[in-house]
C-alpha cells in the first residue's frame, strides 16, 4: 500500500490520539488568523487607508456576507451527501487550502485603482476567499462531533483547538497592526498567508473520519437540500441556539471592527496601539479556556452558555469608561474571560444539537447543521457593516480627514461599549429558551443510526 493510499484509507476507531487531537486543533490557528485579520482591519484598510467611501465598503461587506451565508448550507448539504474513498470532509479541505490562502493575501494587495475599481477588486477577491473558506472551515468544523463523541472528549479536545484559535486571533488582530506598520499591508498579507498554509498542512494529519454503514450512506445521500433545510430549521434546539450565536457573533464583529477607530479617535492612540487593546483580550482568554472546559463538563452546554453571555455582555460595558489606551487595555482583560467562554461552549452545544438530531433521524448531518449555522451567523457581517457605517455616519465621521469632530469619539465609544451589551442581552434570552437542558452524552454517540 502506498503512503498516499494509506492516507486515503485512514479511518478513526475509538477515541482520537493526543497527536491526532492536537493536529486537528491546529486548523483553528489559520482559520481564525485569517478571519480575525479580515474582520478587524479590512474596513479600516479600505476606508481609512485607501479612501474608499464607508458606504461603498459597507455595501461590499453586505454582498460578502450574503455570498458567504448562501454558500454555507449548499456546501454543508453537498458534504453530507457525497462520500468518496477519501471520506466526506477531507476532499473539500484539501482542495480549498491553496485558493483560500492566495485570496487572503490578495485582499491586502490591491492594484492602484480609483475607489470604484477598488470596490470591484474587493468583491472579486473576497468571493474567491468566501468559497474557499467555507469549503475548508465548514468541513473541518463538521469533523468535530465525529472525531470527539463524548462530553469529556469534546470538552478536552476543544481546549487545544481553541488555544490554537486564540493564538490565531492574537496574531490576526493584535499582531496585525505591528506587521502592517513594519512591512506594510502587502507584506502582512503575504506573510500571514504563508503561515496559514503551513498550519493547514500540519492539521491534515488529524483529519481522520469514521466508517459509516452503507445503508446509512444511502439514506444520507437521498435527502435533498430542501428537506435538509426544512428538517434543520424545524428543530427548536437549533433555532434557539443559532439565533443566540448570531447575536454573539455580531457582538464580536462590531467590537473588533470598532477597536481601530476607538484607538485612533476615542482614546487618542496611534494605529499600532490597537495591539495594546486587543492583546489583553486574547491573553486573558488563554487560561480561561481550560476553566470554561471544566464548567462545560460539569454543567452542560445550556447553563454554561447563560453564564458566558452574562460575563461577556457585562465586560463589554467597561469600554464606556476609559480615556486612555492603558485603561481600555485593562477593560480587555474582562472581555477576554467572556471570549474564552464563547469559544469553548458554542461548538460543544452545536454538537449536542447534532447528537439529538441523530437520535431522532438515525443520520449524521454535521455538514448541514454547521452549514445552516454558518448561513445564519454570517449575518453578523451584515450587522457589523450596517452598525459600524451607521455609527460613523451618525457621529459625523469623514473618510480620510486628518481630524474629526468631537462627536466621533463619543459615537465610537457607544459603538463598542453600548451596542455589544444590548446584543448579548438578546442572546441570553435565546439560550434561556434552548430546550436541551441535560449535559452532552457521557458515552460515545454511535457512528451510524439504527
Image (cartoon, rainbow, N blue to C red):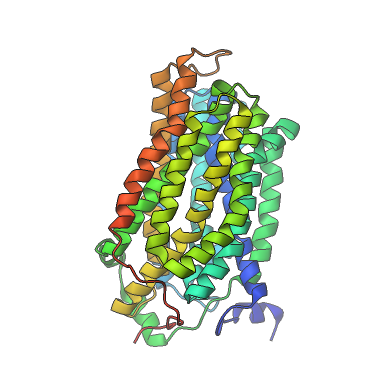
Horizontally, residue 4 falls left or right of residue 40, namely right
Q: How many marks?
A: 0
Horizontally, residue 135 falls left or right of residue 103, namely left
Horizontally, residue 376 falls left or right of residue 204, namely left
Q: Nearer the viewer, residue 18 or 105?
A: 18
Above or below 141: residue 218: below
> Residue at (45%, 79%) from the top-left corner?
442
> Residue at (65%, 30%) from the top-left corner?
273
Above or below 351: residue 419: above
- Residue 58 shows up from this direction: no
The picture places residue 121, in percent across and down from the top left corner, at 53, 35
Above or below 261: residue 381: below
Above or below 117: residue 450: below
Q: The N terminus is located in which quarter?
A: bottom right
The picture places residue 352, in percent across and down from the top left corner, at 39, 69
- Residue 207 shows up from this direction: yes
Q: Nearer the viewer, residue 328 or 142?
A: 328
Q: Quadrant of residue 418?
A: top left
The picture places residue 385, in percent across and down from the top left corner, at 42, 34
Q: The C terminus is located in which quarter?
A: bottom left
The picture places residue 387, in percent across and down from the top left corner, at 39, 32
Horizontally, residue 80 falls left or right of residue 115, namely left
Q: Quadrant of residue 203?
A: bottom right
> Residue at (63%, 24%) from the top-left corner?
269
Amino acid at each position: 500500500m502506498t503512503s498516499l493510499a494509506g492516507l486515503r484509507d485512514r479511518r478513526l476507531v475509538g477515541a482520537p490520539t493526543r497527536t491526532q487531537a492536537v493536529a486537528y486543533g491546529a486548523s483553528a490557528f489559520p482559520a481564525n488568523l485569517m478571519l480575525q485579520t479580515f474582520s478587524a482591519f479590512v474596513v479600516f484598510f479600505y476606508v481609512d487607508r485607501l479612501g474608499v467611501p464607508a458606504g461603498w465598503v459597507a455595501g461590499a461587506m453586505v454582498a460578502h456576507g450574503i455570498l458567504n451565508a448562501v454558500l454555507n448550507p449548499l456546501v454543508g448539504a453537498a458534504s453530507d451527501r457525497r462520500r468518496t474513498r477519501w471520506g466526506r470532509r477531507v476532499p473539500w479541505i484539501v482542495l480549498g487550502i491553496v485558493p483560500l490562502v492566495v485570496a487572503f493575501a490578495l485582499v491586502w494587495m490591491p492594484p492602484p485603482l480609483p475607489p470604484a475599481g477598488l470596490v470591484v477588486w474587493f468583491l472579486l477577491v473576497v468571493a474567491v476567499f468566501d468559497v474557499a473558506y467555507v469549503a475548508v472551515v465548514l468541513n473541518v468544523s463538521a469533523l468535530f462531533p465525529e472525531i470527539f463523541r463524548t462530553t469529556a472528549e469534546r470538552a478536552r479536545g476543544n481546549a487545544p483547538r481553541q488555544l490554537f484559535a486564540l493564538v490565531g486571533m492574537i496574531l490576526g488582530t493584535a499582531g496585525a497592526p505591528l506587521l502592517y506598520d513594519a512591512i506594510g499591508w502587502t507584506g502582512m498579507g503575504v506573510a500571514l498567508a504563508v503561515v496559514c498554509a503551513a498550519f493547514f498542512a500540519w492539521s491534515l494529519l488529524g483529519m481522520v473520519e469514521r466508517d459509516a454503514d452503507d445503508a446509512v450512506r444511502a439514506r444520507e445521500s437521498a435527502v435533498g437540500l430542501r428537506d435538509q433545510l426544512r428538517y434543520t430549521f424545524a428543530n427548536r434546539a437549533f433555532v434557539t441556539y443559532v439565533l443566540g450565536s448570531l447575536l454573539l457573533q455580531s457582538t464580536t464583529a462590531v467590537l473588533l471592527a470598532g477597536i481601530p477607530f476607538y484607538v485612533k479617535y476615542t482614546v487618542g492612540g496611534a494605529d499600532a496601539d490597537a495591539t495594546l487593546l486587543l492583546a489583553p483580550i486574547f491573553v486573558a482568554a488563554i487560561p480561561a479556556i481550560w476553566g470554561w472546559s471544566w464548567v462545560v463538563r460539569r454543567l452542560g452546554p445550556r447553563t454554561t452558555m447563560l453564564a458566558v453571555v452574562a460575563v461577556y455582555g457585562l465586560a463589554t460595558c467597561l469600554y464606556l469608561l476609559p480615556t486612555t489606551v492603558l485603561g481600555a487595555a485593562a477593560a480587555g482583560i474582562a472581555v477576554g474571560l467572556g471570549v474564552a467562554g464563547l469559544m469553548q461552549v458554542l461548538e460543544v452545544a452545536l454538537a449536542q444539537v447534532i447528537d439529538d438530531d441523530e437520535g431522532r433521524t438515525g443520520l449524521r448531518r454535521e455538514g448541514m447543521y454547521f452549514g445552516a449555522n454558518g448561513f445564519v451567523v454570517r449575518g453578523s457581517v451584515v450587522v457589523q457593516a450596517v452598525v459600524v457605517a451607521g455609527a460613523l455616519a451618525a457621529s459625523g465621521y469623514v473618510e480620510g480627514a486628518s481630524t474629526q469632530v468631537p462627536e466621533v469619539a463619543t459615537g465610537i465609544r457607544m459603538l463598542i461599549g453600548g451596542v455589544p451589551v444590548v446584543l448579548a442581552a438578546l442572546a441570553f434570552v435565546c439560550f434561556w429558551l434552548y430546550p436541551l437542558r441535560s449535559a452532552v452524552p457521557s458515552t460515545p454517540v454511535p457512528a451510524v443510526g439504527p
